[in-house]
Image (cartoon, rainbow, N blue to C red):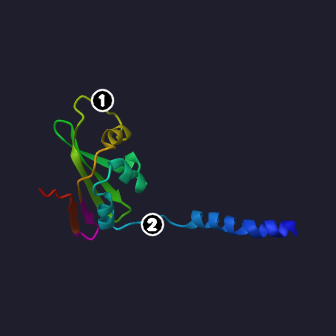
Amino acid sequence: MKTILLFACALPLLLSCSDKKNKQPEVLELDEIAKFALNKPVKLVTDSLRLSADQLTFVDEPPRIITSIVVDYNNKGTIEFFFPRTSIISENLTSKGEYLNKVADNIINAVEWKNVDGTKGSIKNVTIY
């Protein structure tokens, strides 16, 4: 009887664990990602989207100023996260992970995206004086 009771209590727990493994992660639309990312730190957004540094393209302007990050997101299109200009002139960064660490705390102030069907969109942080 104890075995049956123990099995009955453990079964829902086991089933909930197995359901989580079979579920596919939710793929958001690019405009939903843009709304989420605005006014958040770069690292929080990349972690939330489960993006590794290798999936990111860092856009820099001469002389070695990082201005944004571009991501090709799950075959939905590309999305670009803009943040305050970050100088890496005196840095000796050799990997994308180091680039990400350099801009991790920067707050995203604009996002632009282009869907695979060619439609574009953007959202910006507007300061009213």
Asked if the stretch drawn in magenta spans residue 116, the answer is yes
Question: Which residue is farthest right?
Answer: 1
Q: Which residue is mark 1?
A: 92
What SS does tag 1 mark? loop
Instruction: Please name the amino acid that badge 1 sits on.
Output: Asn
Give the quarter of the image for residue 50: bottom left
Instruction: Please name the amino acid that badge 2 sits on.
Output: Glu
Which label belongs to residue 26? 2
Residue 84: percent from left, percent from top: 21, 45
Question: N-terminal of the two: label 1 or label 2?
Answer: 2
Q: Residue at x 35, y 40 (%)?
A: 101
Which label belongs to residue 67? none
User: Image check: 69 left or right of 10?
Assistant: left
Q: Nearer the viewer, residue 83 or 61?
A: 83
Nearer to us of marks 1 and 2 is 2
The residue segment tinted magenta is 112-119
Q: Residue at x 21, y 36 (%)?
A: 64
- Figure quadrant of the N terminus: bottom right
Q: Residue at x 30, y 42 (%)?
A: 103
Q: Residues within 10 Å of mark 2 (few under 14, many from 20)?
A: few
Asked if the stretch drawn in magenta spans residue 117, the answer is yes
Give the quarter of the image for residue 77: bottom left
Q: Residue at x 37, y 48 (%)?
A: 43
Question: Which residue is farthest front?
Answer: 129
Q: Nearer the viewer, residue 56 or 128?
A: 128
User: Image check: 47 left or right of 113?
Assistant: right
Residue 40: percent from left, percent from top: 31, 53
User: Considering only vertical position in the picture, is 2 above or below 48?
Assistant: below
User: Considering only vertical position in the picture, is 75 above or below 107?
Assistant: below
